[in-house]
Structures are given as C-alpha cells and as structure tokens.
Amino acid sequence: MKPYLLFPIDVIAQGALPTNLESMSSDLELDVLFNAMAAGDRFFYTTVRQIVLAAPPEPDVIRYRQHILQDCLQLPELFRDIYRVAVEALEVQRQHYFGFMRSNPGAALTGSIHLLAAYVPLLRQIHQIMAKSASEIRSEGLKRFLAATQSELSEDYLNEIMTHVHDLELRRGATMQATIGQVGKPMHYRLLAPKPAGWRDLVPVALSRDAYSFEIAPRDDAGFQALDNMHNRGVVDVANAVAHAADHIRAFFNALRTECAFYLACLHLHHELATRELPVCFPDMYSSDQLVFSATGLYDVSLALQMDPTSRVVGNDIAADSKSLIMITGANQGGKSTFLRGTGLAQLMAQCGMFVPASSLRANIVTGLFTHYKREEDTSMNVGKFEEEVRRMSEIADQITPGNMLLCNESFASTNEREGSEIGRQVVQAMTEAGVKVVYVTHLYDLAHGFEMQGSDNVLLLRAERGDDGTHTFKLTENPPLATSFGRDLYARIFGA
Amino acid sequence: MQSSPSPTVSIPNESTPGLADAAPFESVLFVHPGEIAPNVEREPACFHDLNLDLVVADLTRDRETSHLLPFFYQPLRDIETLHYRQDAQRDLERSELRAAIDRFAARMEVAERHHAFALKQEFPHGRDRWLHDAMTIYTDAVQVLADQLHDAAPNSLAFTGLRNYLSTYVNSASFVAMAIDGQKVGEMIGAIPYTVNINNGRVTVRKYEEEEDYPREVERTFDRFKEEDATGDAFDNPPIPDAGYVENRVVELVAQLFPVEFAELAAFCQRNAQFMDAVIHRFARDVQFYLSYLDYIAPIRSRGMTFCYPEISGLSRGLEINGGYDIALAAKLAREGKRVVTNDVHLSGHERALVVTGPNQGGKTTFARMIGQMHYLAALGLCVPGTLVRLFLPDQIFCHFDQEERVSTLRSGLENDLMRVHGILDEATAESLVVLNETFSSTMLSDAVYLGKEILQRMLEKGLLCVYVTFIDELASLNDATVSMVAVVDPDDPSRRTFSIVRREADGLAYAAAISKKYGIDYEHLKARITS
C-alpha cells in the first residue's frame, strides 16, 4: 500500500534534479520561497525543494494535488496527526534499521522482525486517525487513502503479522535442509519450520549413529562467520519475504512523511501570505503542448515574503496565451526583473499543485525551467564576460528541450548592442522555433525592436513604465520598446564608466 | 618500436604424451611452434602521444589481462606471423566461433579459480569436492569447444590447428574416462540429503526426513507486500568461499554418514590429478589478446565505422589509407553516440612527408595520431580503423607532441624540443616513422620557420616517413617529397570544424573564432541542439 497523496498512480522514483538548479535557484530566489514553506524545518525544506523542482506532472495530477491541498487547508489537524505518526515511524526505523545488512540475511531477519513489531502499533494509529476524520474528507486522493487504511490495515492482519514475528525469533537455532548440490554451485540450505522441542533433541548426539555434531571454538571468529554465512543462506528466502514487508512499510511511512510535509509546508506559506492579505488562487493548468499564460494580479512571491508585511506588492495583469515570446523592455527599476522572477516562481508553484501568488492564473505546464541572467561579477578569471555568457547559454542548450521555458534577464548585454542583439535574436529565434517558451528582459533596443518589426502573433511586447512624474509604477504595459538612450546607459555600466 | 632482432625462447611442451600426431598447434599468437618472443613489460615511447595507452587501458579494464600487456607492447615485423594473427582474428569475427571461444574462456577461468581453491582446502573431502568441480568444468569446457569448433569450420591456420589438436585430445582414452566418471561421481555426491542445525556455534548434521516447505509458508503471509517493491533488492547469496571452512567440516560429517560415496569421489580425484593440458591452458589466456581488442572496437563499429585488415608491404614504401580515423577518439565518440570523421592518405613515389596545416581544433593532431596508430596496430596483427589500408611496417615509431607539462622543466621549451628532435634524428633510420606535432610552436615565427625547415629537411634526407603538424605554411611546400595536407574549413561557416584533412595547398586561412558559433548557440546549431 502507498499513500498516493502526490500521485494517483505509481510513478518511478524521481531522478536527480536537473543540473541547472544552482543558477535558477539563485536567479529566482527560490530559497526565500522554500524557507517560508519550511518554517525552519530542514526536512520540509528538502521536501518542498524536491517536489517544486521535480519534473512537472500532468494537469490531472496537478488538480489531484490541488484538491488534497484544499482538504489540508480545511483539516490541518488531520495532516499534522498523520505527520506525527510518520515521524515516530522514522524514530523506530532509526533504532532497527537493517538496510546496511544486505549481505547478512540472518541479521536482517532479526532486524526486520523487530522493526515489524514496532511498526504494527503505528499502522494501527494511522487506521484510527483516518477513521476519525472520515466524514470531512472531500478530495479524491484523501478518500482513497482513507479506504486503503481501513481495508489493508485491519486488526486481523496486524495480528497475523505479530504471530510470524514471534516464530521467526528462532529460539532453538535454525534447522535447515541441505544437499551438497551440483558441482560448482554453493550448497543449498532451506530453513525448516521452527518447531518446539521434540524427542529428537532429547537423544544426545554422541549416542546417535544418525547424527554428528561439532562445536566452533569460542574464539574462532572465522568459524562463527562461516556459520553465519550458512545460516544466512538458509534463511535468505524467509529474510527476503520479511524484509520486503518491513521495507514496504518503511517506504510507506517515508512516503507518508514526505507527502504530508509538502502539504503542511503549503499550509505554512498560505498562512504567511494570508497575514499579508495577499491573494492566492488555484491555477488552471494546461498540458505542455499548448501555449497558455494569463494572469491577473500576479505578484512576485519572493519579493512579497521579503517586504515589510504592511506594504503591498504590485500585481500585474498579463495576457500571453498563444505567445511563445514575452519580451520586456523599459525603465530600469521599473519592475522588469520582479515580473520575470514572479513569473518563474508562479510557474513552478502552479505546476507542482500549489496555489499561486495571483488573483487568477492559467498556464501551460513547462517541462523544464531555465534562467539566463546577466552575472554581476565575472566569477572566472580566464573567460571574458561575454564568452562566459555565451558558454552559459551553451550549457543551457545542452539541457533544454522543446516544451521548456527560458527566462533571460539582460542576456548578452555585456557586449555592444549590435552584437548582443544579433546573438540574442538568434538564440530567441532558435529557442521559440524549437518549442521553448522565452521570457526575455532586455534593454537592447535593437533586439526588442527586431521582434517588434517581425510582427509575429506569437510575440508579446511588454514595457516597464515610468510615471509622468518620473516615479516607478512597477506596472508593465503591452507596449513596444522605446528608442531612447539605453545604449549609453549600457555602455556606462558595461565599461564601468 | 624496437629495431633489435627478437631473440626467441622456447617453452617446454607439456602437452599430453600420445598426441604427437596432432597438428603442431602451439599458440594462437605465434605461428612457429615452440617460439615465443621475450616479455616486453614497458609500453613503447610513442604509446602516450598516440593515445594508445588509453586504448590498451580501456581494452584491458575488465579483464584479467596482465599477461596480455607484453603482447600489446610488442609490435612485430614478421609478415608470416602477422598474417597468422590477422587470419585468426578474422575467424574470431564470425559470431559462431566467437561465441564458442567466449564460453570456453569464461569456463576455463572458473575452472582455474576452483582448482586453485581446492589446493587450499584443509579437509580431504572438501578438497576432493573442489577438485572434482574444477575437473568437471574443464572437461565440459573443452568438450564443448571441440564440438563447436568443429561445427564452426574455422579457416585460419591458428584455429584449424586448435580444432585438430582438440579433436585428438577429447578422444583420448584418459579424457573420455575423466568426463564420464566425473559426471557420475558428481551426481551421486550432489544428491546426498541431510539437515544441519546451527545453534550458537553448535552444528549438528543428520540424515534428512521429509518436512513441509516453511519459507513458502512465510512468503505467503507477506505476499501482499511483495508485488510492488520486489525490485532487485533481494539479499545477496553470500559467495562460496566464505563458508568454506565450516562447510567443509560439515562435509566431513556428511562423509561419515555416507562413507562409500565419498571414497569413490576421492579415488576419482586421485586418478585425474593432472587434468589441465598446457597448450589449451595457454590458448585460453592468449586468445584474450584478440577478444579484448574486438570487444573494444565493437561499439565503434556499431556506429557504422569500418575496420579492415591492412595489406602489409615488405618492400614498397607507399602509404595508402582510405577512411582512416583515430581509434581512441572513435571509441570516445562512440560512447557519446557519435561518429568520427575519416580521412584518406596517399603517398607514392618519393613522397615522404605529410605536412598538416589548418585551423586549431581542426583535427590535425587526431590525423597525425591516426597515422601513427595505423602503423602500430598493423604491426600487432590487428585490424585497423579504416576501409582500405596498405602500409610498410616501420622499424620504429617516434613521436614528439607539444605538451604543456614540459614548460615546468628546467630547460626552456625550445631547448627541450630541439634536444628531443635531435635524439629522434639520431635513432631513426630510413625505415622509421616520425610524427611531430606543433613542434617549435612556442617560438617566434621567424625562428619556427627556420627550425621547421631545417628539421624537416633532415628528416627527408634520412628518407624516413614523417608526419609534421604545424602552423607554418612554408613547410608544406618545402620540396617534392612533402605533401601538403590541410584541415578543411567550411567556407560558409569558418568556425565549423569539419575534421577533414585533405591533400591541398596550405592556404593559411585564419580560424575566425566567432564565439557564438564556437559554442554552438548560433541559430542553426542551437535549434538543432534543442530539437535533436
């Protein structure tokens, strides 16, 4: 049995996280989000990081999670109780863990039966906790978990486990059937039923012509090791069966702990945003083969979490359905970077089943998210800034695939505008034609203007506005780039003047 | 490659007496029975520069091959032996014969291991059991190989010789008796039933009486947990020798319960104490020379790359390479799912020097390596990376590759270069091959031109075959003996590396390093990278 709180079906264990994470995490300030969700709990932190950054599931799975999360917002105590039992199971497992004894089935058998004995009361608790809240559960996922706990963790079955646990303590040693076997093969041993003392054991071996015995000398460590080895081979089948059971239950509790932690972490974030009176909504998600991105009141959750709780962050409305390129130009300090980061964060949150920082949002799933941000300082001594940018883009190209999303922040601004624009144009053109959705913040007029002239329906041009009085509104409007003196600013910055 | 004549040593013929009429098969690596060349334990000087050290390291990685290294370190010039090897390897490329040899080699390894283990046994019955085990595996391996070799109908002198040798051997009375008796005794011992109880260091052995299957009963109860999670995390069955010590004491007790059966086993082992034939034993080890190489090149071939058996000339000094490539690079690219670019070389008449120019990263070094490797591999009697190759075997191969680490030595880079090249010129003969890679590249251009011309002139005066990779265009047209080879640049895209090296005039075309193209993020490349 499995909790099935993240996926309604069995999924292959999540592989390694993508290698672009380090730069993406810092570019999007993911740590701010993760820390708010973890609320100081290291395990929560690891868990949300893993789930938020994992390859996104299909839209129906996202809805499945959204419904469970809605239950969690309604029934926080239920989730906390289950999480508490799962944590207890972890403690039990720390005391009896046998995973390192793979080559020692005998010791593993002993470990497994102790572990099973300790697990049984915890399984009983899960059964009871779920039964208590049965009538208040709304989501499909939680209903399913309820049903599983009631049918598969019945009192009868838990008692049956305990009977075997008792027998397998092998109080009278292991008696095994054996044959010398085929040439070149190990001897075969097979455990015989652990029986109570019988007549056979009462006849001294020395008097019997049908039995011979010897004793390993007390300090003969190699001899005892060899005995262990034989014992191990005899119990290997039984040890496998019992260890599988213990493993399975261990995996069940581990999964339960992880899955509950995710929802409880969402609960933390929900609380943080509610304190700030910021809106959240459950997004409407589309499959990765569609181009959808529209939102109202979309704000940067990372900025919101870092700002004074009393000040309001600015939300943006954006209608970018069927757009493969969103190019953002305009005034410095005009909210371009904030918008870019907010978009990336909302995308990640949306596609792992969380609520998003917006009044409304619909988006297609992107199967991978990459960031290419201008680096403030050159970390490498022997590669020029521009070449470093190019190299990083090349590293992205190594990994990015159709259906992914690329967030560019002032990419290729470390060279002159003509060159930077030309390379940027080629990159954007190649990316979008290959099926990568690109959001590009730039002050390279030539670059943005080129896409304006192209006049493609798939391009959305946004501009950060300055108010008439020169103050920043932080609002983006649907506008083409302005031909102004950005070039001189760029020059001044790049060349350190 | 050493030019000194190879002294030969004879090895004692330990094969079974009475097989004197069999074909004079002695070795799968050497054609003349009783003659085996001396052990060469150090890799030749050119190994590293030609990346042959990588090749040999790779192909000996997962094998017990320490005994093979001397063969890889010892290029030959004896054409009869080289043909003997080429033919043997051709036979091994046939799947039927190859499968037979693979199986045989694997079984022999097990037999040897078990034999060695038997000799370490402390208890007599345990030792007999292991001896019997080794003998049974050996007889089976040899018998099966004899049958399969017969069916595979080999063509080479080496394998027809082996086939005939085996056919006589397996029909000998002693071998037949060993096979039949061995099987009978094994079945009898193997079927002896007993039980053993282990309780705190006390081991009790009894005759077995029927009981119900307890593990199955336990498995049934826990079945509901098994289905999903039973993914290869079962416990290892501990390796055999670990329990051997106590298990053999158990065997001694079982032998007390069943004395007649064990006496028969002992008699069998005594009768067949010397069971392994020396020629067969050596064959099993030596054939790994070919197998390791064929396994190494298999992934390269699976990318559609061709290997061929070079035509080795004893007289003509011409060189013809069609579709040649660097074997080490091809192996690396094959692992990445890619193919390597091939190149052709034709030298005829009095042409002696290939001067290779062109852009950096254009494949010049790879090309130079390829020519060196080609000559070396041909001299091992192996197939070479190319579609058609004709070459003359050099007496020695000298390499001088520009290496960064030389900078740290006391002498200046230039001084080192000159010392080294001087040494090569001293040692080389008219029949040598010299590969120079970017020699003098760290010098001022005028010096480099002067030195390059001088050195090349001296090489040409020796009459040796020379490959000279350089950025100095002037060397390419030094005289009639030089042939200019150029790393090709795509005119539409100067930074596209074609890795093609063609015979044409050096044009000094600068390698314009458009950075975006170098990194493959220009429109075309980027799009291809994302969608591929």
Image (tube, rainbow, N blue to C red):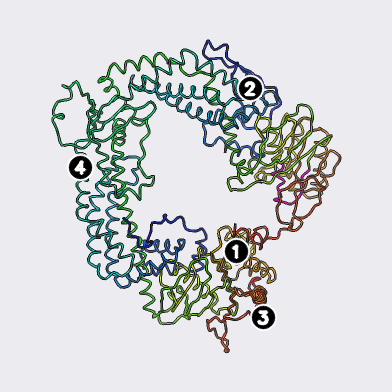
Q: Chain of mark 3?
A: A
The label number, if any, that marks residue A167 in the structure image: 4
In whole angstroms, how far apart are the C-alphas of marks 2 and 1? 58 Å
Look at mark 2 in the image and give the residue it sits on. Answer: B157
Q: Earlier in the sequence, mark 1 or mark 3?
A: 1
Q: Amino acid at mark 4?
A: Asp
Indicate left or right for B199 with A349 as reference. left
**Front label number (4 vs 1):** 1
In whole angstroms, how far apart are the C-alphas of marks 3 and 4? 84 Å
Q: Chain of mark 2?
A: B
In whole angstroms, how far apart are the C-alphas of marks 2 and 4? 67 Å
The answer to whether dots 4 and 1 both sit on one chain is yes
The label number, if any, that marks residue B97 in the structure image: none
Look at mark 1 in the image and give the residue it sits on. Answer: A434
Q: Which residues are magenta?
A: B355-368
* Mark 2 and mark 3 residues within 8 Å of each other at the beta carbon: no
In whole angstroms, how far apart are the C-alphas of marks 4 and 1? 63 Å
